Image: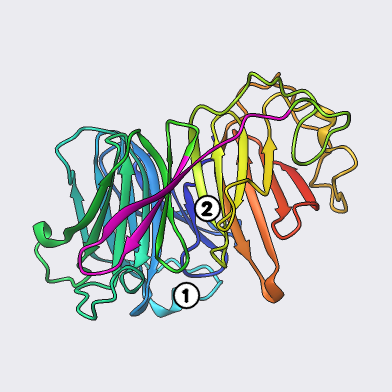
Amino acid sequence: QLRHLLACPQRRGVVYFISDTAIVERNLFSPQAPPRKIIEYNFEPTCFAATAVPSNPNAILFAVGGLRSQLHISLHSFSPSTTSPQPTYTPPKLIWKRDCTPSDEIDIVNTIIFTPTSLTDDSGRAGSELRMGVSGNNSIVRFFDIALQPHVRDDQRLQLCGQVELETFINHLSISPNGRTLLCAGDTPKAYLYHITPGQSVTLSHITTYILPPPPPPPQSPSLSSTATSPPNIRSVACFSTAWSPDGFKFAVASQEGQLCVWDVRSTVPIFTFWTTFRPNSYWKGRIQDNTGLFHSTRPDDNGLDSGIRSVEFTGGPGGRELLLWVEHTVNLHVIDARTFDLATHIIIP
């Protein structure tokens, strides 16, 4: 399944991902170079996150979550020569690592995110420069301050600084670019928005809850906002992924039933809705820009099965350009202009 298990936190073209029980590095500029193992952990992974350290341009912080509440967190220093696109095999230096189970519940860890502490702490007395958000099947979102200094004791490495309990398992969470709004989604067709009151302790207060709408009646002709064959009794049951646009004015929520909704924060009605479930193979015909041979006008005929959207992301560019990308189950990548929602590309993963 195409989940969000790959990160490019620092160097263009150098990506990190989880493979079995290890974090692995691969340089896309040198496809012939073998991947290298950064560190191993001793549990089955379910989610992955990586971020550059603001105060140290040569350091990367990794985190992996597991099936039974396990967390692996490690900080690594890469030699200056490895920050270039060219491959190098100088081993990174492990500064510290922490393997723990930070809660009494034995539940799946579904999401780990990092955020600069300055976004969620305006007290001026922050004791760390990065915070970590963790969610899972215990229905709780927890925020931790991370002590990055090498001399800190293991049991002092993570300090709980805020939490909130929801009504359902939490499959994904994301924080708005200004650090003031938390977006959560789980085993319901709902998107939960919480206001983040910054400080040394994070306070979370519920703002509103959005519900993913049912599909519209079949239109006369397919459009990007609906599908020609979606039966009215099909609707989303659980949500897998969330994302914020770079300007913080839009957010997206995607479901296991193949529904994607985008809202403007100033409206309660989605400005864009897309369904993968039961979409006919001819859906993308005439909408594909195929100049390279990489894009296709059809998709495998799976009769609507296994069309869950596992990951959705916004990306920004110069001049206010903005794309929305989402991956469908195992082979389909979709890209659309996130300003107008009218220019789309579908890529089938080999």
Q: Residue at x 75, y 35 (%)?
A: 226
Answer with the quarter of the image where residue 106 lies.
top left
Colour scheme employed for the rendering of this structure:
rainbow
Question: Answer yes or no: do the residues labelled 2 and 1 have beta carbons within 8 Å?
Answer: no
For residue 246, above or below residue 234: below
Q: Nearer the viewer, mark 2 or mark 1?
A: 2
Q: Around disc 2, counting alpha carbons within 10 Å, would you say few (fewer than 14), some (14 to 19), or many (20 or more)?
A: many
For residue 195, above or below residue 210: below
Residue 349 in view of the camera: no
For residue 18, above or below residue 8: above
Q: Residue at x 66, y 70 (%)?
A: 317
Q: Residue at x 19, y 79 (%)?
A: 125
Q: Residue at x 61, y 43 (%)?
A: 261
The magenta stretch spans which residues?
191-216
Q: Which residue is mark 1?
A: 83
Residue 212 in view of the camera: yes
Q: Which residue is mark 2?
A: 243
Amino acid type indicated by mark 2: Ala
Left-right relation of 21 to 34: left
For residue 249, above or below residue 40: below
Left-right relation of 184 to 166: right
For the N terminus, the quadrant is top right
Horizontal and vertical percent position of residue 36: 43, 55
- Nearest the camera: 192 or 252? 192
Horizontal and vertical percent position of residue 239: 49, 36
